[in-house]
Amino acid sequence: MKKILTYYLAPYYRRMAAGISIKFFGTILDLLLPWTLAHMIDFVIPTGNRNEIFLWGGFMVLCSIFAAYLNITANRMASRVASDAIFTVRGDLFAKVMYLSHEDADQITRPSLISRLTSDTYYVHQMLARIQRLGVRAPILLIGGVAMTMVLDPVLACVLLATMPPLALVVVFVSKKGIPLFASLQEKVDGFVRLVREDIVGIRVIKALSKEDYERGRFDRINRDVVEAERKATMTTAISNPAMNIFLNLGLVGVIIAGAYRVNTGTSEVGKILAFMTYFTIILNAMMSISRMFIMISKATASAGRIVQVLEAHDEREPRDQGEENADSPQAPGPNIHKTDAVQAPHIEFDHVSFSYHGNTDNLQDIHFSLMKGETLGIIGSTGSGKTTIINLLMGFYQSYRGTIRIDGQDIRTMKFKDLRHRFGVVFQNDVIFEDTIFENITMGRSLTRKEGEQALNYARAAEFVAEKGGLDEKLDIKGANLSGGQKQRILIARALGAGPEILVLDDSSSALDYKTDAALRQELKTHFQNTTCVVIAQRVSSVMSADHILVLEEGKAIGYGDHDYLMEHCSVYKEIGSSQMGA
């Protein structure tokens, strides 16, 4: 919360000061009304002077009009400050999410990031707006009301003030208990968002497997958890209003009894008692407003902490401390590993790289290979063997690995973020097609011409079906729902090829292509991208058999490395895969 108040609100301090000043004067005018009414009842009306009555009545009307105008103006200013500040917060938060390191994103989780961008920023926005409105008005009404009652009748004011200590204890208790409960509630909401997101994305699978009732059961359980957490939080904060009503009403009873006695003895006037009752109502409403503010502050504090956690997380553009190389017991390279050239450094080099996602068991263990510019590496292995992890490390998504990854002889952890990523054209496993035109899905905001987009479609063997659908300006549905699996993959490959990448990464990008199209695509790459270094992850041996080097993975370890012929002779796992797919 401190960062929100001191950093994001700093540019608006002057506007806030002006709004608070306007709100202050408007509130003072509201406080003058009961005192004016008491003065008229006790001193003006008994004289029977109509002109003086109209004069004081006109004064009350003017106070009401100016108070309303000033309060409305201050509220509008407060709303604008809150909106502008949270606009900046949302912008910075979204930008941070875009550059958030994968380690931190995995730890926070994607559904939680969505929740922080939406509901958490909403709670902070509500707090910023109301703290400028009620946060200024309510304390002034409370303090000013008590001050006015002291001026009118100190004895009755003391009766009222006796209720303040227990009221303060209620507010402290509720705020102390409420903040942790609302933080726990937001964590439950994160899980709720995650389940809803998964079910909506996987609705076809759920229907295909007739798992609707099962998912409803899961939803009911997590929905019940959210409701229970919300009930605990709201029941705790709900104590404040009834408790305040009890104490203030007890104070009111005391004021009425004492006031009646004092009027009867002639030590007080009826107008003062009426004004006192009005001030009591003002004080009651102010206390209720303060109570509601503490509840809102409890929610906003929990939300602000979650927002600041993301804002202060590691940014991929900021270098981490370079990891130490695992030089304790490096394994000897395989027989066909490309040796470092004395003149030219390898284009891509993994030097005894090990990595663990959670810091327990290594997901990759002592991976070592090198590629010269224009060479192709095929990676093959069972699910979970570490194929995609190699790509994640190569592109710098994770940096907490042991060993060294170099591009053109330079450790990638010493490269600037954009310099590294601009080298790549990539098709990820389960990649995303956006709800936009085919051309925009290829360019992705890059300065590519339509001619370059058409050329990329030709290379990806996608030009024919794109022409049938209406050309580059044809609108695609979200996630490419109006495309077949093979068509999606070819659009994604065209995106990767569009800017003429230095390094091309294809992560299982031809699984939906028929063998003929797959072979034609490989021929296009061989013909038009001879100087592009390729890393191809595939399940088919036919997709990698022509690669210069093939890396066979099993449980994060390299169990084979070489060309197709070498592996068919020396790697039993590769030979088994090849024999099962292509025949003995």
Image (cartoon, rainbow, N blue to C red):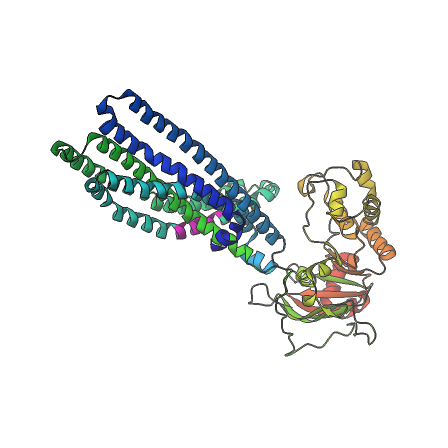
Q: The C terminus lies in which quarter of the figure? A: bottom right
Along the viewing direction, whichever of 383 and 198 lies nearer the viewer: 198
Q: Which residue is rendered at x = 63% and y = 79% of the image?
A: 328
Which of the pair 177/580 is nearer the observer? Answer: 177
Residue 559 in picture, x, y percent from top left: 70, 69
| Chief secondary structure of the magenta portion | helix
Q: Residue at x 54, y 55 (%)?
A: 310
**Place of residue 322 in the rendered image (x, y in percent of width and height, measured from the top left):** 63, 70
Toward the viewer: 11 or 539? 11
Quarter holding residue 313: bottom right
x%, y% of residue 311? 55, 55
Q: Is residue 583 visible?
A: no
Q: Is residue 188 magenta?
A: yes
Residue at the outermost right position = 527
Residue 437 image offset from top left, x and y in percent: 74, 40
Query: In the displayed image of the protein, which residue is found farthest to the left?
Result: 265
Q: Is residue 13 magenta?
A: no
Asked whether residue 361 is in view, the answer is: yes
As drawn, 43 above or below 290: above
The magenta-colored residue range is 179-189
For residue 359, which quarter of the picture?
bottom right
Location of residue 18 with respect to 427 vertically, above or below = above
Q: Quadrant of residue 24?
A: top left
